[in-house]
Each structure stands twice: as structure tokens, then as C-alpha cells.
Image: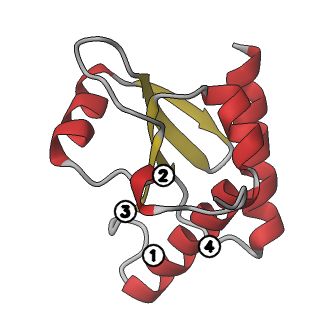
Amino acid sequence: MKINSFPTHEKLKRKSEIDHLFKKGKWLTVDNIRVIHVKSNDSFSVPNHRVGVSVGKKFFKKAVDRNRIKRLLRESYRLNKTTYLEAFKEKSIVMIFWASKEMPDNFSVVESQFLNLCKKKSES
């Protein structure tokens, strides 16, 4: 398997996992990126880490804008997966949100904020 990939088994899709995440998860915010995360345990086991991405309709009415931001968030995760795994560890469920009304200027802005988020998580 390629190191810089985002295969289907890493994507957060199951409703039961998403419900568990919002019920037991902890929030973390850095700049314009907000994350809710929970570690897998015996009561709710995940074979590996799963990541979901979301952008709200409240701030971005056009689907084109929401999809652009989601692509940028997924790409920043995909390229910096090793940093992400060091911060959030294996067997975790994470959902990444864009929590700002402003459209990011370019990919480097999103990537730097994602790296700052991983850095903050690994420090705590």
C-alpha cells in the first residue's frame, strides 16, 4: 500500500461510528480547523483509524465551495498522514471540520493549520 494514500478503509462512513464519535468525542480547534476525536476501546473497536471531513452549509451555501474545502482538507491529511498518526495514534476516529466563514486562499494555508493542529494534539 502507498504511504500517501487515502484508501476506503480509512474513510469514516458508518453511522454507528459517527454517532459514537459525537457522543464520546473530544473537540480540538486550531485556527480555522476543528476536530472531534475519540480513541477506539474495547466497547467500540475500530480495526484502524478512520477520518471524515465536513464543511457546513451555514458558512458556504454553494456546494462548489464546500467541496473545494473538503478536497483541501483531505489532501492535507493524505500528505501529512505520518504526522497525523503520531498525534492521534492508531485505532482512532476523527472528523475534521472547517470552522470559518472565509474561504482559504490556497492549499498551503490549510496544510499549515492542519500541521499546527497535529502539533497541538501531540503536545496535549
Q: Earlier in the sequence, mark 3 or mark 1?
A: 3
Q: Earlier in the sequence, mark 1 or mark 2?
A: 1
Q: Earlier in the sequence, mark 2 or mark 3?
A: 3
Neighbours of disc 2 within 10 Å: few (<14), some (14-19), many (20+):
many
Q: Choose mark 2 or mark 4, whichever is in front.
A: 2
Identity of the amino acid at label 2? Phe
Which dot marks residue 97?
A: 2
Q: Choose mark 4 or mark 1, whichever is in front.
A: 1
Q: CA distance from mark 3 to mark 1?
A: 7 Å
Quadrant where the C terminus lies?
top right
Where residue 33 sits in the image (x, y, percent)? 60, 48
Residue corresponding to mark 4: 103
Q: Are marks 3 and 1 in contact (CB under 8 Å)?
A: yes
Residue corresponding to mark 1: 66
Where residue 107 sits in the image (x, y, percent)? 76, 71
Q: CA distance from mark 2 to mark 4?
A: 13 Å
Q: Earlier in the sequence, mark 4 or mark 1?
A: 1
